Image (spheres, rainbow, N blue to C red):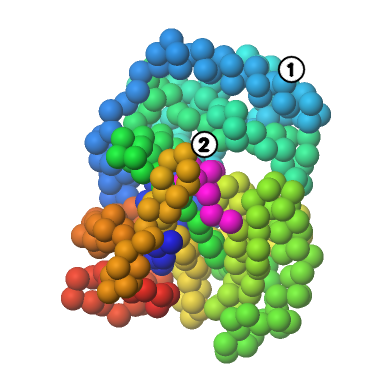
Amino acid sequence: FFFARTPSRFIFALWHLLPQNTQFADHSSSAVMHRRALSRVAASSRPRLLSRHLLRRMSTAAAEIAERGAAAGLKFYQFSFVDLFGVQRSKLVPASRVAEIAEGGAGFAGFAAHLDMDPTMGDLLAVPDAATLTPLPWQPEVGWLSCNLVHEDTELAHGPRNVLRSVQARLAEHGVALKTGVECEFFLLDGSAPAARPALSDPLDVQAKPCYDAHALMRRYELISTLVSHMEQLGWGPYQADHEDANGQFEINWDFDDALVTADRVVLFKYMVRSLAERAGLRATFMPKPFASLTGSGCHAHVSLHEPGTGKNLCKGGAPEMHGLSPLALSFTAGLLAHAPALTALTNPTVNSYKRLGARMTSSGATWCTDSRD
């Protein structure tokens, strides 16, 4: 595994894992840079026209969604996508119309979301990926779907999920598959506090060094354990949860997987955390730096290259003097270091992202080592 601390909430090679726009996040010119950067990444990949083959696959996927949903007793389906600021957008579709809407795509006004579109460009279609159909554990009659964005019979090149899929396709041409694991940090806030003046939800969480505090963790046992149980139900393989370095801050870890699978799960994870927090009278935020005096939230990204089909880890097997890293892994690391300055346009899209940064500068602005030094 490669291990990197993303300066913002997340996204390393995961173009789909874009930071969420919380109620009190401060967007500015840096956010515009983020949008333009992602658009340039998208522009480097050829947009895919919807061939007859793809249209047939959409029809087959629609039938699969309707069939699996009926077997699960679903009454509604949430067609969802993530825009360039990481805001999750969705429409609710009744079971009686899901096959029809899934085949053609749910319509959205693209300019109304944070996408590089204007009102003259017509509707955007969100076409669901049948493999992502997930009954919401806290609302089991609703099935959640992650969608690919289509505009005028062509996949929207700068749609975050489409960007990641295009990167995966380019890796596949080189016989490589990207797998990722993430560790998302979040704060639990007082649900009654004004959004402009966020406050911690636990008045007893006041330790000067609160990381791994057993009492603070167990005071939120009901919410954290419910989240972990739901993740087990979904088959994500959660393996630990802890209180993090700041007061009121938590983290839950789950198994790594294919980059697109992990990306979709992060989107659903954040949705789930926020939804269950609201039900408990709390607010959850993944904002990088909600409190100036406390450690900010980030997301470790574990990134590794594998052989398609076999799953063999292509990062292993190097010489001891190369820390056991293969030549491919060393080249991959070198590429990340070389492009680290440009990556910050994606990993640090808001002013608040930079308020979180406090690491010592290196001569290159980025570095690496054989173990975590974050």
Q: Residue at x 35, y 37 (%)?
A: 172
What amino acid is found at the position of numbered circle 1 in the picture?
Ser
Q: Is residue 203 left or right of residue 164?
A: right
Residue 238 location, quadrant: bottom right
Q: Position of residue 330 (x, y in %)?
A: 27, 61
Question: Eyeballing the image, is 48 above or below 360?
Answer: above
Residue 10, numbered label: none
Q: Residue at x 71, y 57 (%)?
A: 227
Q: Position of residue 114 (x, y in %)?
A: 42, 40
Q: Residue at x 63, y 75 (%)?
A: 243
The answer to whether one can see residue 281 in this image is no
Disc 2: which residue: 81
Residues at marks 2 and 1, CA–CA distance in whole angstroms: 22 Å
The answer to whether one can see residue 41 in this image is yes
Q: Secondary structure at mark 1?
A: helix
Which quadrant is home to the N terminus? bottom left
